[in-house]
Image (tube, helix red, strand yellow):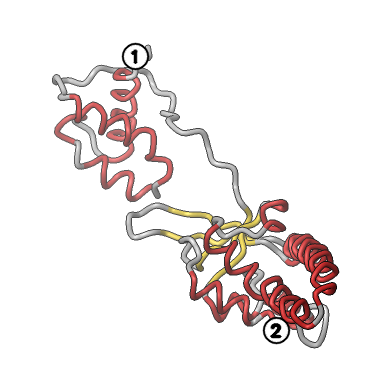
Amino acid sequence: MLDTVRQIETPEGVSLQLHAAGAVPRAHAWLIDFGLRAFVAFFLLMILGMLGQAGLGLGMLVLFIAYWVYGVVLEVWWDGQTIGKRVIGLRVVNADGTPVTLLPSVVRNLLRTVDGLPGVYGIGLVSCLMDPHGRRIGDIVAGTMVVHVMKRRAAGQVPNEAAEPPPVPLHRDEQEAIVAFAERARGLNEARQRELGDLLEPLTGRMGNAGLRKLVAHANWLLGRT
């Protein structure tokens, strides 16, 4: 039931940490969604029951939407979150960290029938406990996972480094590129940081970590820091 972290590196060299949700927070989100759907369906069925046979047919449609359509629609068009997942702070994503799309969402929701066997999500619970990323059968087949929504770090944070002016005048776009790199470098793995920093060795006169520190110093100076 413990949450785990899945480390993914994108083709651009950016390291992503997906904090996989365990069985407990997922169960809480499911209970919220189930209670909400049950309440709405019960209320609508009471009203539709007054319409006779026509109301019965509409009632079956309501139950179908509540059970099958609810999850897919919200996951695809509401940033991977049902109401229960949003309350708990969870999100469905593809296994590579990209937003979940229609087909994977349909597959994972259809396979709830399997995960629900033999009752009260027995198979799904066993799968969540055995899988290193807390996935039920539907997630494994669909190539999805449920992760915690992590608070984003404040944007535009250049590391502290004594400000130093560039050795040569820079055009505006060059200044913006240096500041942008200093702001985003911590989102890249160390090898990718050094690789990009080494490209600016003619400006910094340094390679490796020394070159990176020099770039940060130039960024701080361009931002008017002392």
Look at 20% across and 36% down and name the residue there.
200
Percent of width and height locating residue 158: 41, 28
Q: Would you call the spot at circle 2 few (<14 residues within 10 Å), some (14-19), or many (20 or more)?
A: some
Image location of residue 112, percent across then percent down? 68, 79
Mark 1 vs mark 2: which is more N-terminal? Answer: 2
Disc 1 marks which residue? 224
Which residue occupies the foreground of this view, 219 or 162? 219
Q: Which mark is residue 103?
A: none
Q: Is residue 201 left or right of residue 31?
A: left
Secondary structure, mark 1, is loop
Instruction: Decide if residue 181 is on the left or right side of residue 71.
Output: left
Helix or strand or loop: what does disc 2 sit on? helix
Q: Are marks 1 and 2 in contact (CB under 8 Å)?
A: no
- In the depicted view, which residue is nearer to us: 176 or 51? 51
Position of residue 176 in the picture relative to residue 6 (left or right): left
Residue type, numbered disc 2? Thr
Determine crowd level at label 1: few under 14, some 14-19, many 20+ residues with C-alpha closer than 10 A: few
The amino acid marked with disc number 1 is Gly
The residue sitting at 15% across, 24% down in the picture is 171
Image coords of residue 164 (percent x, y): 29, 18
Quadrant position of the N terminus in the picture: bottom right
Q: Nearer the viewer, mark 1 or mark 2?
A: 2
In the picture of the structure, the residue carrying the numbered disc 2 is 113
Instruction: Tell me which residue sits at (79%, 66%) in the image.
Output: 44
Where does residue 130 sit, x and y in percent of width and height? 69, 77
Residue 60 falls in which quadrant of the image?
A: bottom right
